[in-house]
Image (tube, rainbow, N blue to C red):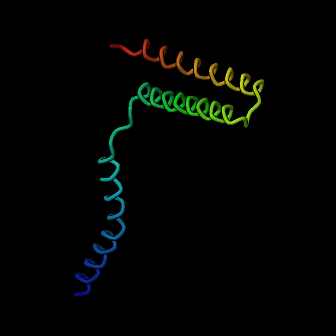
Amino acid sequence: MQIGLASALALLIIGVVAWPLLVAARRRSARPAAPPPAEFHSDERRLALESVYEAIRTLQTDHALGRIAEPDFQKQLAEYRQEAAIILKDIDNAGQEQPT
């Protein structure tokens, strides 16, 4: 009787300890695979480009409302355009590197 009770208790303890590990393993295996590195970087670059475009739109709005002086506007706009050009060049280079 005591051996049966000890065995049942041991199985219960093993089940309590193992259950979270089994659930975590199932979740990991059910998780979608990470995108390929080139695709991930492409999405990241596109988000960065959209961020620069949004900053340009905000800058233009602020300039139109008179919140930013002309010299500051021109300087900041040139910096944003240069940043956008760099990102576009990276996107273009990444597209050429990928096999078709």
Q: Quadrant of the N terminus?
A: bottom left
Task: Judge from the rendering whether residue 81 lies leftward or rightward of residue 15; answer left or right.
Answer: right
Q: Residue furthest bottom?
A: 1
Task: Judge from the rendering whether residue 20 lies leftward or rightward of residue 84; answer left or right.
Answer: left
What residue sits 74% from the left and 23% below the top? Answer: 75
What residue sits 40% from the left and 16% below the top? Answer: 98
Percent x, y of residue 41: 48, 28
Q: Which of the two residues, 19 or 30, is positioned nearer the viewer here?
A: 30
Percent x, y of residue 44: 49, 31
Total label count? Answer: 0
Task: Judge from the rendering whether residue 59 lies leftward or rightward of residue 24; answer left or right.
Answer: right
Q: Residue furthest front?
A: 65
Q: Quadrant of the C terminus?
A: top left
Q: Which of the two residues, 95 or 5, is positioned nearer the viewer here?
A: 95
Q: Is residue 97 above or below residue 25?
A: above
What residue sits 33% from the left and 64% below the top? Answer: 18
Quarter holding residue 57: top right
Q: Which of the two residues, 91 or 22, is positioned nearer the viewer here?
A: 91
What residue sits 72% from the left and 27% below the top? Answer: 73
Percent x, y of residue 34: 38, 37
Q: Is residue 80 above or below residue 89?
A: below
Percent x, y of residue 27: 33, 53
